Image (tube, grey):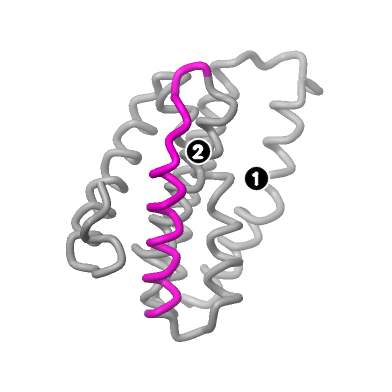
C-alpha cells in the first residue's frame, strides 16, 4: 500500500503538477490571475511537503535533512528573482550543510539525495513565493512549520549546529 501511494505521489508531483503549473504561470491560460497562481503554487508546495514525509519512510535522510536542504535552496532561488527577499549567501550555506547531513544519513546513496533535493527545490521556491508574494496563510503555516522542524533538527547536527 505504501509503495502504491509513493508511486502515485511521485507521478503527481513529478509530472502532472509541473505541467499544470507551467500552463498557468506561463500565461497560456488567460482565465487565471495571480491569485490562482499563488493558490496553485501553495497546493504544489503542500504536495511537496507530503511527498517528503512519505518518501522518508524508505530513507530517514530525506526528512528532515534533504527536505531542509531543498527548502533553503528554494528560498535562495526565490531571493534571486524577488523584489521582497534579499539574497543571502547564508541560505546556500545552510542548504549545503543540510545536504551534507543527508548524505551522512542516507541509506540510498548520494544520487538519491540529490534527486530528492532537485525534485523538491522548485516546489519550495513556490512555497516561499506563495507565502511572501501572495500572502497565502497555508503557505506561511507550512513554511513556518518546516522552518521549525529544520531549526530543531539543525541544533542536533554538527554540520548545522553553528549556522544561523
User: Residue 47: x, y in percent?
Assistant: 49, 49
Assign a secondary structure to mark 2.
helix
Residue pictured at 42% horizontal, 58% vertical: 67
Q: How far is mark 2 from mark 1, CA to CA?
A: 9 Å
Q: Residues within 10 Å of mark 2 (few under 14, many from 20)?
A: some
Residue 61 magenta-highlighted: no
What residue is drawn where x is 22% and y is 47%? 148
**Which residue is more in the foreground, 128 or 9?**
128
Residue 93 vertical placement versus 106 (above, below): above
Q: On the image, numbered disc 1 is attached to which residue?
A: 17
Mark 2 or 1 closer to N-term? 1
Question: Contact (CB < 8 A) between labels 2 and 1?
Answer: yes
Q: Is residue 52 left or right of residue 15?
A: left
Tell me which segment is drawn in magenta.
Answer: 83-104
Q: Which mark is residue 159?
A: none
Mark linked to residue 43: 2
Q: How many marks?
A: 2
x, y (%) of residue 80? 57, 30
Residue 9 x, y percent position in the rendering: 56, 60
Q: Residues within 10 Å of mark 1 (few under 14, many from 20)?
A: some
Residue 30 lies in what quarter of the image?
top right
Task: Describe the element under mark 1 as helix, strand or loop.
Answer: helix
Q: Left of 102 or right of it: where is 3? A: right
51 relative to 147, above or below: below
Residue at figure coordinates x 43%, y 47% from the top left: 72
Q: Magenta span has 99?
A: yes
- Horizontal and vertical percent position of residue 53: 39, 63
Amino acid at each position: 500500500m505504501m509503495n502504491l501511494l509513493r508511486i502515485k505521489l511521485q507521478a503527481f508531483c513529478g509530472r502532472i503538477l509541473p505541467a499544470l503549473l507551467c500552463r498557468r504561470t506561463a500565461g497560456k491560460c488567460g482565465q487565471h490571475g495571480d491569485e490562482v497562481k499563488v493558490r496553485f503554487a501553495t497546493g504544489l508546495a503542500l504536495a511537496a511537503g507530503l511527498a517528503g514525509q512519505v518518501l522518508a519512510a524508505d530513507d530517514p535522510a530525506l526528512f528532515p535533512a534533504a527536505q531542509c536542504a531543498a527548502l533553503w535552496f528554494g528560498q535562495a532561488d526565490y531571493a534571486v528573482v524577488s523584489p521582497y527577499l534579499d539574497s543571502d549567501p547564508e541560505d546556500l550555506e545552510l542548504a549545503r550543510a543540510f545536504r551534507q547531513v543527508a548524505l551522512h544519513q542516507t541509506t540510498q546513496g548520494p544520487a538519491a539525495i540529490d534527486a530528492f533535493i532537485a525534485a523538491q527545490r522548485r516546489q519550495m521556491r513556490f512555497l516561499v513565493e506563495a507565502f511572501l508574494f501572495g500572502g497565502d496563510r497555508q503557505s506561511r503555516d507550512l513554511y513556518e512549520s518546516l522552518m521549525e522542524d529544520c531549526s530543531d533538527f539543525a541544533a542536533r547536527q554538527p554540520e548545522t549546529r553553528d549556522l544561523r
